[in-house]
Amino acid sequence: MTRRRLALLLLAWAVGCATPALAIDADEPLPDPDRQALYKRLTHEVRCLVCQNQTLADSTAPLAADLRRELRELVADGRSEDEIKRFLTERYGDFVLYRPRFSARNALLWLAPALLLAGGLVWLYRIVRRRAALPLDDDEEAGGTT
C-alpha cells in the first residue's frame, strides 16, 4: 500500500469517527443556580414523548425541544417540582415520567416485581417439598451409582 493510499485511508477513518458535538440545550443557564439545577434534574426525569426511551436531556427530537422550552418556562416562573410534575402528568399522562408516582392506576406496575418474586419462591418451595417426599431408589440408599 502506498503512502498516499494509507494517508487517505487514515483521513477517511478520522472523518468517519469524528462525531459532531451537538448542543441539545443551547439556552443560557437560568440566573438562579437552584432553578437551573431543578431544570437539569427535571430534564433527566422526564421522558421524550417521541423517542420514549430517552430523556428530554438526551433527545434531539423537535417535540423534546418544545418540552424543554416549556419546562424551562415553568421552572423560571418559580413553580415547584411537584407542581411541574403534576402539570406534565395531567397533560401527558404518567408515561411522561421515568419514575411514575405510586397510585391506584399503576399499583400493579410497582407491585409486580415483588409479586413475581413471592410467586417464584412459593413455586420453588413446593418443588423442593415434593422432591423431598419422593422415595429413594434401592441403589441410592446403598450409596452406589450405576
Image (tube, rainbow, N blue to C red):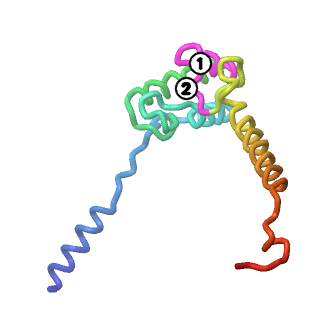
Give the residue at mark 1: 89
Quadrant of the rendering where the C terminus is positioned: bottom right
Q: Main secondary structure of the magenta part?
A: helix
- Circle nearer the N terminus (2, 1): 1
Judged left or right of residue 116, residue 128 is right
Q: Amino acid at mark 1?
A: Thr
Residues rendered magenta in the picture? 79-98
Is 80 left, or right, of 60 in this rendering?
A: right
Assign a secondary structure to mark 1. Answer: helix
**Quarter occupied by residue 1:** bottom left
Binning the other alpha carbons within 10 Å of mark 1 as few (below 14), some (14 to 19) or many (20 upward) gives some
Would residue 33 be found to the left or right of residue 67 on screen? right
Please tell me which residue lies in front, 17 or 123: 123
In percent of the image, x 42 and y 29: which residue is there?
50
Residue 40 horizontal side relative to residue 120, left or right: left
Q: CA distance from mark 2 to mark 1?
A: 7 Å
Q: Is residue 138 above or below residue 45?
A: below
Query: Label 2, on which residue?
Result: 96
Residue found at x 78% / y 79% = 144
Q: Which of the two residues, 28 or 107, is positioned nearer the viewer here?
A: 107
The quarter holding residue 140 reads: bottom right
Give amino acid for label 2.
Answer: Val
Residue 71 shows which numbered tag? none
Q: Residue at x 83, y 77 (%)?
A: 143
Vertical side of 26 occupied by 105: above or below = above
